[in-house]
Amino acid sequence: MPGLTRWIRRWQRTDWGSRRRAKPCSPSTGTEQGLTRPRCLPNANVSSSLGGFMTVARSSRTRMAARGSLVVLCCSMMPMFAWAQSQPNTPAATDLLSAYRAALANDPQFASVRAQSLAQREKLTQGRAGLLPQIGGAWSSTRVIFDQTAPAEFNKTFSSTGWTLSLSQPLFRWDRWETYKQGEIAAQASEASLAQAQLDLITRTAQAYFDVLNAQDTLQLATAQRDAIQQQYEQARRNFDVGNANITDANDAQARRDAIDASVIAARSDFEIKQSALKQIIGEPVGTLAGVRPGVTIPQPEPASAEPWVDQARSSNLQVALAQYNLQSAERDVKKATAGHLPSVDLVAQTGHTNASGNQYLPSLPGGARFDSSQIGVQVSIPIFAGGAIQSRVRENIALETKAANDLEFARRSAEQGARQAYIGVIAGLAQVKALEAAELSARTAYDSNQLAYGVGVRIGTDVLNSQAQLFQARRDLARARYDTIVNGLRLKSAAGSLSETDVIQVNTLLTANGSSDITALPPANAKTASTKPAGKSTKR
């Protein structure tokens, strides 16, 4: 702001500004865009020879200077406000633990299961209510008007007001007892269902998280490869123009450049899709994700054998627990249907009051009549014939019980298979990571060799590009193997029913904010580039 700077300098050259600089004052406490704001005021001891006119002028200049300082301050702050408004609302860097906790609060699928669990817990209260006394009350008021054809000795109107209070206490209702026991099973099943939803949320979040990292690596590698091909193309064109190479290198590089553009577009699209999938789970914009630390050692599963994991899955898998609860509920349904053949016994009691006036049978009673009644007793209901409905419901529930038993067996086998597959996936993933680490080292050595050979003229640019692409592919495969191994480890614990937030924290220790920053880093050049080679040297084989 040159104009503002010149205005400040002119103001400083004024009389008031000169006196302000000349007088001692306390040190400044801060700056605004490079302008120091002293906290002191000019010395008030002005020479008395100036008289009253200078006093008035001084106060006027003081007010003008204060206004000018305010203008300077506002003008100096305007660039800061503009810069702040221009900054994009970019999400902060996040890791797996923060993503999981955001998913706990925002994932609609988990929220749906949580609400369903709360609703299912009410089955226990509803089942208990069927065993408790039922108390009801009623109040009524009626008025009857007779027509003119009624006998003369009858009153033409009749009014009645009354209330009743009734109580019913089940003494023997086997179906309600079974309903109560089903409520207990439903409450336990709701807890298992919510715990299973939490395990699924961990694995879904981890899968979506590492899918984003994998897509990010693919995009970075495709972009780096495109840049390398572009540089190689430009270098080949320069060599061809000066007569150091034939057109083959340039044509090959151009063909590769045209082909890699499509790969970059596809990689960018896949990256955005994966980000959207993660955002759907966590309910927040996806920022820069922490990647796996280079050279990290993924821990072995403990115990280091498949059978203990399979045995634990058979007994502790939450899907197996839910299938067991369903079988228990189906057994209660059979008993509840069979209870339709049994009698029911209830204790009943009732009390009431009726106030009648204008009684057509007792017209001489002044003020009407009042009646109070109370009764108590035992009521027994015996089913005799229901048209075959009870037997039909029994057969229906027996068939559903058989289905629930088969579902339980299927859940057990699925849990065993899931645990075994996850364990094999972890072990195979660890071996694959070790092999790909060796492959990445070999690819790096091959790239160094081709780069050196290209510098002395015994390799062409295509060889360098091929070795670079092989290096990038090895790095991407290595990163993907690490992601898959980590996710399989979480799935293994989920199959065994032992997955928790502690495991997420443990995985989070394997991550770092710049985990993928060096995935496109190339080894330093060991030889001179083709542009520095002698003019007579050819790059042909």
Image: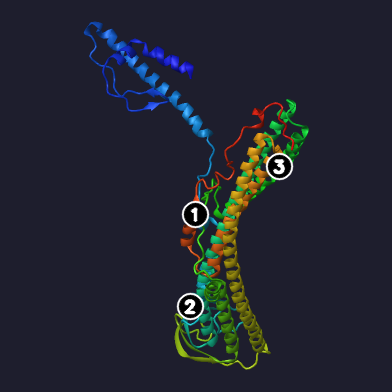
**Earlier along the polypeptide chain: callout 3 or callout 1?**
3
Q: CB under 8 Å between callouts 3 and 2?
A: no
Tell me the CA gap for discs 2 and 1. Answer: 67 Å
Q: Which of the numbered marks, if any, corresponds to residue 502?
A: none
* Number of numbered discs: 3
Mark nearer the viewer, 3 or 2: 3
Instruction: Label 2, secondary structure: give it.
Output: strand
Tell me the CA gap for discs 3 and 2. Answer: 81 Å
**Which residue shows up at 70% across the image and 41% down it?**
463
Residue placed furthest toward the top: 49
Q: Which residue is mark 2?
A: 137
Mark 1 is surrounded, within 10 Å at the Cα level, by few (under 14), some (14 to 19) or many (20 or more) other residues, namely some
**Which residue shows up at 52% across the image and 44% down it?**
91
**Earlier along the polypeptide chain: callout 2 or callout 1?**
2
Q: Which residue is mark 3?
A: 260
**Which residue shows up at 52% across the image and 77% down it?**
185
x then y, percent, for residue 24: 26, 18
Q: Which of the numbered marks, if any, corresponds to residue 510?
A: 1
Image: 262 above or below 163: above
Which quadrant would residue 55 be assigned to in this image?
A: top left
Q: Amino acid at mark 2?
A: Gly
